[in-house]
Structure formats: C-alpha cells, structure tokens
Image: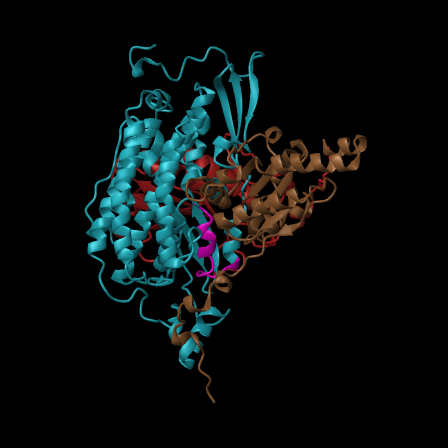
Amino acid sequence: MSLQLEARLPNVLGTKLDKIVGWCRQFSIWPVPFATACCGIELMASACSRFDIARFGAEAMRFSPRQCDLLLVAGRITTKMLPVLQRFYIQMAEPKWVISMGACCSSGGEFDTYAVVQGINQFLPVDVFLPGCPPRPEQIIEGIMTIQRLGLEGRTSTARPLGVVIQPYDVRDKVPDDLKPNEQDWQKPTMVT
Amino acid sequence: MNSNHPTIEQLYQKFGEQCARSENHAAGMQVVIIPKSRLLDVMRFLHDDGACAYEQLTDVVGIDYLGYPQARKRFALVYPLISVIYNRRLIVKVYLAEDDLTVPSLSGIYRGAEWPEREAAEMFGFVFTEHPDLRRLLLCDLFKGKHPLRKDYPLRGQGERDNFRIVTRKTV
Amino acid sequence: MPAAIEDIARPARLEKLSGSADTWILNFGPQHPATHTTIHLVLELDGERILKCTPHIGYLHSGFEKLAEHHTYNQYVTVTDRMNYISPIANNIAWHGAVEKLLGIEITKRCKYLRTIIAELARIQDHLLSVGEAALEVGAMTVFVLLFNEREEINDLFEAVCGARFTTSWSRVGGAMADIPEGWTNYVESFCDKLTRAVDDCHTLLTRNPIFLERTKNVTPTTDAQVLNWGWTGPVARAAGVKRDLRKDEPYLAYSDLDFKVALARSGDVYSRYLVRLEEIEQSRKMIEQALKKIPPGEINIAADPKVMLAEKSEVYGSIEGVIHHFEVVMDNRGFSTPVSEVYAAQETANGELGFYIVADGSDKAFRVKVRSPSLQHLQAIGELLRGHTISEIVVALSSLNIIAAELDR
C-alpha cells in the first residue's frame, strides 16, 4: 500500500501516511508460531501470563499464513520440514517479517547432522536472529521489539531482509558496583611463582 | 547353561541348543540369542504360552557392529520384551550377516512392532517380510537408498541438507 | 439433547467405505496448532467422519541416535534435554541412570533422593502441560494459563538448581552437576502448597463440566489387551487398566522408600487419561513432601573415582591434582573407559517408559544408543483409534496421548 501511494501523492504526505500505517502495523503484529521443537515451549511461556507478549500487541497468534505478518520459526528445521516452511512463507502476504528463534534454525545449533538444515537463512530471508537454546522469553520479546523499532523507523524494505542479530548482553555490566555479589576466593586463580 | 530366569529354562526345553545366553551384558540383563530361522516360532511361543506370557514388545533395536571389538556378525536386531503379569523382562537378540538382511516381521504377533521395524528398515536396510506397510518413516525422499545409522554413513550426511531451492522475497 | 452422555454412540457406524467417490482427503498438519508441532495426518473423510487416517511423521527427525556416537556420556545429556522437552530433567535422569547401570556404579543416597524429587517435579511439569493442552484444545484457555503459571514456578525451581529454566542438563555420571542450594527445600514445600490450589481450580473448572465431559467421554476407548499389544506404557496405558508402573514394579532411585499409589482407570478414553494424569500430579506431590523430609546429608557425587567422576571445581581451580584429574576424565582417549557390553535401562517418565539401549565399546563415547520413546508407540495406533470419529475429536485424542514430536522422531 505504501509503495503505491508514494507513486501518486506528493512525497511528504506519502511518508507521513507510511509512518501512521507503520505505527499501527508494528503495535499489532500478529505472529504465527511455527513451533517445531523446544523453542515452541518457550514461545508458549512468553505468551502466558508471566512474560505476556500481549502487551506488545502480539497476542493474536494466528496459525494460518494468510492471517499473520510475523513468521516466528521456533525450533529445528529438518530436511523434511524445510519445503513445508518455504511454502508457508510464500503463502504469507507482504509486509512480512521472519524471526529465526533459537540456535537450531539460525545455524543448526547442537544438531550438526544429516537431517537438520544448518541455518534457514540459506533458503529463506530472515530478518531477526535470536540466539539461545532456547532463548529466554525476555529475548523473544526483545526480538519482537526490534522488529517494531525497525519497522517504525521505516526499514520495512520488501527487497532485502533486515538481518539483525540480537546480541546477548551481560546483565552484570548494567549492575552498579556496590550491588555486585562477592566472588568466591577459589574462583580467582592463585599465581604460583 | 544355568540361569535363574524361568523363561530361559522353558526356551531350552522347547527349542534346545538353538538358544544361547549372552554374556557381554550388564548385570541383571537376561538376553537370549536365537538364530533368525526360529525367530517367529520363539516369539509366538513367548507371546502365547501361559507360563511365559510376554504381552508387550517394547522396541525393535537395530545395531551395526562395524568396528566393534569381537563382533560376531555385522548386524543385530534386539527385541526387549515385557511380561506384565509376571513382572519379567527378557531380551531376544538375532545376529544377521551383511548379505542376508531379510527378517520375518513380528507385526502379526505384536502390533507394536510396526513402526519400530519401519524405522530399523530405513536406518539400516533390514527387509521385514510380511510387514503391512514398509514405507520410509522418519526420513524424507532425499534419503532414498541411503541408510544413515550405518557406521559407514557420515554424521553430516552426503549433501542432502544443503540441496534446496532458495526462496527470496520476490518468489511467488 | 441426548438423555445421558453414554447414549452417544461412538464411534458411529461407518456408512461409506473408504475409497468411494464421495469421500475427500484432508491434510491435518504438519503445521497445525493442534498437532503439537510436526505431525502430519492424512485423513479420508466422509463429511466429518474419519474413514481412514494415515499418520506421517519424521518432520523433526534430527539424528539423535547418530549424535550419540560422537558425544561422550557426559556431553550427550545436553541432547537428551531436547527429547521430551516438556520435562527435560526427567530425560537427563533416565539417561544417566542407564549409563550408571552400564558402568555398574551405585550413586549416593543423597543423590538418589534428590534425583527422585526432581524427577517427580518433572512429572508434575509434564502433566500440567498435558492437562493444560487438553483444556486448550477443547477451548478452555483459562485452565491452560492457570496451569502454565505453576509450570513457571517449577522452571524457577530448576533455575535455582542448575541455572537453566528449561534445557537443564543437570545430571552427570555418578551424580549431578551441583548440589541443591540452601533453602531450596523450603521453596519446594511452598510450591507444593500452591500447587494444590491450582489443581483444585482445574478440577472445579473441568471435571464435572458438561461441555468437557461431552467432548472427552467415550472418545477413543481402549482395552488393556489392545494397549499392551500396541506397546503403550505410562498414564495412557494405566487409563486402560494395565497395572504397570516401573516405579513400583522395578523400583529405582528412592522409590522403594516412598509411599504412593498408582492411578488406574478402566475405560481408556480421553476422560480417564485426563483423570489419571491429575491423580498422578497429586501422588507426585505427596511423594515430594515425603522425600523432602528424608533427604540424607552427605555428598551428592560418588567419591571421585579418577576413571569416571569429574573432580570438584574448587579442586580443579586450586590444586594441580584436581587439574590432572579433570584432564584425565574430560579429554579424548584418556581416563574414562567403559566395559565392552550392552545395557537396556528404562525409567518411568511422565509419558511412559523411556528406555535407553546402550552398546558400549570401551571408549568414552557410546557405540550405539537407541532411545525407546513412548510417543512412537503411542502414535502408531492413531490410525486405528480414530476410525469413525469426527474432526473435532482428533484434536482431543491427540492431546490426550501427549505426543511429543521430538521424542517421536528423535
């Protein structure tokens, strides 16, 4: 819709409308949980009452490709399942985003075997990669928020995937010094001269 | 050989020296090795006989002994059995040579053998005669003719996992 | 409106034979909310009645058994986490139980009690999700969210023990990764109190609910002879009347010291499986409360046998002998050795009998590992079970069997 309008309206109006539409889209993003394995359980946990992605507008988990905009691939994708996943992706309507959740679909994870595809981004455009095995629900929420942030900035390019990796950050870096726990003595190696 | 497992005694009485008791198993495991030709008879006896009454076949395990110290033959099939009434376990083992992998199917006696046999067939190459449906169970068509769990098949496969079309945003 | 629930004739008389021109074929899965991840059922339907159902599995086959030939016994526990991912710690305990039987190691009493408590917590975790899914499929989302909340509490307990909520990899050969922290037992006691309330809520909402009864009673009834022939074990077999529970029949860990009952039902339909699971949650809770009072003090790991057991981390970081010990056990082709033999060991996990057939060749990696997965045996029968039922009953029947695709496909 945004591309067609840009062709007809003067530029300022087109971008403003784009922004409003983008804002609506991002805060009511409907994911489809393409849950194959253990990451699916963490996805369910993030949808339940403790971690609650409903507050991000992503509560309506639709299972049909025609009704969703975010494909959350959660779990390992095997050689038998990949054609199914590809067909599913093609059936989704633009604009669509893909989150590759967990180590197994981002790179094969622990399963460097004959049957597991070592990274679905070889065969499918992926926008956000979430590391972890499984990623904690907080990290899933960070992934969805990244797509929201990037979508709001206007980076909803339909030509190229976004290719963002959520980096794990160490919580200890954000804790002020006087609250850090004391390290045990035996954890510091003694220098023997 | 003496044993304190009543079923092994009965098997000796009925089938003679064709049954042997295996030694290289952890303590507490009762294993019987039988030749392939008597497999169906022994299983039928174990299932039907009132004093044995092994109602449940837990699993069908295929083993490839290539590279194993002191291996008897290259392949083996293991059938762990459970008798719920008498609370007993028994393990039946059949050794198979590399060129003769045809085995009678146990799905006529134990319905629970169907899928484990299909899996053993596709992973190792066993052929189960009189099986109701011996299609591939776990692997996709890319693995036609290949048997992944054999020792000469590499862990990372032979390129099946890299061979797909690439879907871009422009694909319809 | 029928006079009584039992008057509904299920399965109905099949009026058309499969293969005639009026039937149609529906693909149920492999991507479908109700199939619990990747199970594919091809249904031949006459209207809504199922004439023929063919399951296709393998969409999650990842080569677990081939991986075992390349991982040591302590490394493979990370892979066993990913099997029955609803209660991963139970798989760890079952795996190391099998390895310890192979090596002939007897773990310490404290470790037995702790493993028992954690296995029962894992069983509760599994049944909570299973009952929650059964409710979710029927449409009762409240029950799902209620029970999932209790699961989050159990995740917190596991996080306190081993650092990971979910894929725990807690046990090691001869013991566990670490002992329980201070105050963990109080935490577990307070959890058990909270659990009673959640399970009571579940009973109030579902057990006598006419909608739930109508959707689950007399759906896929099974008899005990059928079930034994198919190879079913665990709560689905006990719901059909099979009197077998490995915790009573072949006691392992600390189960012989605990006093508990085994839940049995007679009709083997979806409703009785639901009731059996709820009763097992209650019995597990009682077992945990008894065991918490009886945990013996002492070491959790067996005395450091240089061939097998890892050294204490404080020794490893603090003394040269500790470093050498660690090196000997962990590095390839040194230290760790196993007898050249085979073992089959099974434990009663929440889904049924999880067994490992391990063939060892003397090195530190297994030669062949076969996982006897309960879900594979359960799903075999689905074609026969679902004949004559309607589409809405597939959903309920599948969730009652608690098929977990990773355990099914390995």
Residue sitting at x 73%, y 44%: A160
Quarter holding residue B13: top left
Residue B85 left/right relative to C137 = left
Query: Magenta stretch: dominant SS?
Result: loop
Q: Note whether C212 is above or below A84 in the view shown.
A: above
Whole-percent x, y for residue C118 in the image: 32, 52
Whole-percent x, y for residue C102 in the image: 37, 59
**In the picture, which quadrant includes the N terminus of chain C?**
top left
Residue sitting at x 75%, y 35%: A14
Colour chain C is painted in: cyan
Whole-percent x, y for residue B80 in the image: 38, 45
Q: Answer whether residue C82 is magenta in the image.
A: yes
Whole-percent x, y for residue A143 in the image: 57, 47
Does the rendering let one see residue B23? no
Quarter holding residue C151: top left
Q: Note whether A126 is above or below C309 in the view shown.
A: above
Residue C152 left/right relative to B150 = left
Colour chain B is painted in: red
Q: Answer whether residue C38 is magenta in the image.
A: no
Question: Which region of the structure is painted magenta?
Answer: C70-84
Quarter holding residue B57: top left
- Report how many numbered discs are placed on residues in the image: 0
Q: Depth check: B1 or A153 in front?
A: A153
Query: Which chain has been coloured brown in this picture?
Result: A
Does the rendering let one see residue C136? yes
